[in-house]
Amino acid sequence: MFYTCGPNEAMVVSGCGRSPPLLIAGGRVFVFPCIQQIQRISLNTLTLNVKSDKVYTRHGVPISVTGIAQVKIQGQNKEMLATACQMFMGKSESEIAQIALETLEGHQRAIIAHLTVEEIYQDRKKFSEQVFKVASSDLVNMGIGVVSYTLKDVHDDQEAHAMQEKVSAQYKNEIEMAKAQRDFELKKAAYDIEVNTKKAESEMAYQLQVAKTKQRIEEEKMQVQVVERTQQITLQEQEITRREKELEAKVRKPAEAERYRIEKIAEAERLQLIMEAEAEAESIRMRGEAEAFALEAKGRAEAEQMAKKAEAFKQYKEGAMVDMLLEKLPLMAEEISKPLCAAQKVTMVSSGGSEVGAAKLTGEVLDIMTRLPSTVEKLTGVNISQSFTPVDSGIASFKTKVHSSQMHVNPPEVHY
């Protein structure tokens, strides 16, 4: 049957056909059951804490030395593996480690005894090399190789005792210091409590005082604001009074004076108008009375004249009628001649056997007036051409008015 092992172990096959025994480090082998036997041995690296307590140096100073060593069974070297199998076959790793440890510890003690404390302290590397060299020569004979050795610690017992006493004293001192610190902390805590209490009371009193001070300052500010406001109000009132006086001086008084002046002027004008109206009324009244008197006198005169005319008409009858008609003849002539006088241009057509020009117009007017007696006779039944002498005088007056009209009126332009 086949058996295998890892690189950290070795197998030893012994029995029939295996003389000397077969050594295999990491591999496999065929084993005949019952006639052959197989054993295993560990090839793991073992770490050893090599400690030598109270070893006297060359000068008789006891010291304690601790070194660290790594050892292992050399599986690659067949002779060393065979030696290790002869010495350690059937032993556990702890047993192998213990054997190696005791060997190293003995060599370590021997080397310490040949050196001084100063040499060990000053040249640790040299000490480690000596231990490595001496221990390796012995352990090789056991099939074990020393991989490494390092000096870990060198401890002087006297110094250690002194150090211990020092440490003890230091611890006691620290304990006393701790106690003192504790007492100090307790007292300090009590003091801090008292101080904090006083401080809190002081801060509260300070805050209270600050609050009171702020309140007093605010009250004073309010009082200042009240005073300022009062002064502002006073100033505003004074400004209002000043503006009122200025308004009164600049606007109201001049306005009142102007209003008074206008009122007086209006009053004077009103009185003047009233007086003028009264005077006018009086004048009208007087004029009315005068006109009424004149009208009355005129009316009476006209009435008397009319009465006289009526009486004359009654007495003279046709003579009065003729006289009245003759009085109106000049007016009739004037009215007849007005259209001709107002004309700017007159076009006349002549047959060649009669007069032309202004004389023609005058003749036409006289011809019209000549026909008036017949017209009056037809209207009134009075033949004024056969009446009394006043008729001649009326005609004469009529002719005079006609000629007068011709003298004062520019004759119209006559075209033929």
Image (cartoon, grey):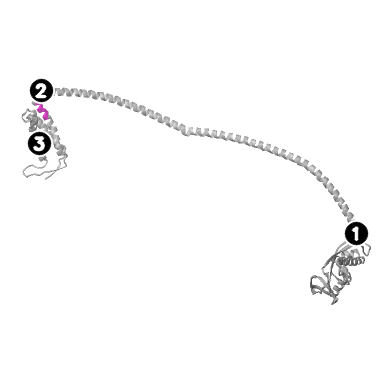
**Amino acid type, mark 2:** Lys
According to the picture, the residue beneath numbered tag 1 turns out to be 157
Badge 2 local density, few (<14 within 10 Å), some, or many (20+)? Answer: few
Please name whichever residue, 301 or 75, is drawn nearer the observer in this view of the structure: 75
Report, in whole angstroms, how far the alpha carbon at label 3 lies from the one at label 1: 197 Å
According to the picture, the residue beneath numbered tag 2 turns out to be 314
In the rendered structure, the answer to whether residue 305 lies left or right of residue 225 reads left
What residue appears at the point 86 percent right and 71 percent down from the top-left corner? 85
Locate the N terminus by quadrant.
Answer: bottom right
What residue appears at the point 86 percent right and 50 percent down from the top-left corner? 173
Where on the picture, by quarter, is residue 223? Answer: top right
What residue appears at the point 88 percent right and 54 percent down from the top-left corner? 166
Whole-percent x, y for residue 256 in the image: 44, 31
Whole-percent x, y for residue 176 in the image: 86, 48
Span of residues in magenta = 319-326
Where on the picture, by quarter, is residue 366? Answer: top left
According to the picture, the residue beneath numbered tag 3 turns out to be 368
**Amino acid type, mark 1:** Asp
Residue 263 seen from this side: yes
Which residue reaches farthest right? 60
Report, in whole angstroms, how far the alpha carbon at label 2 lies from the one at label 1: 205 Å
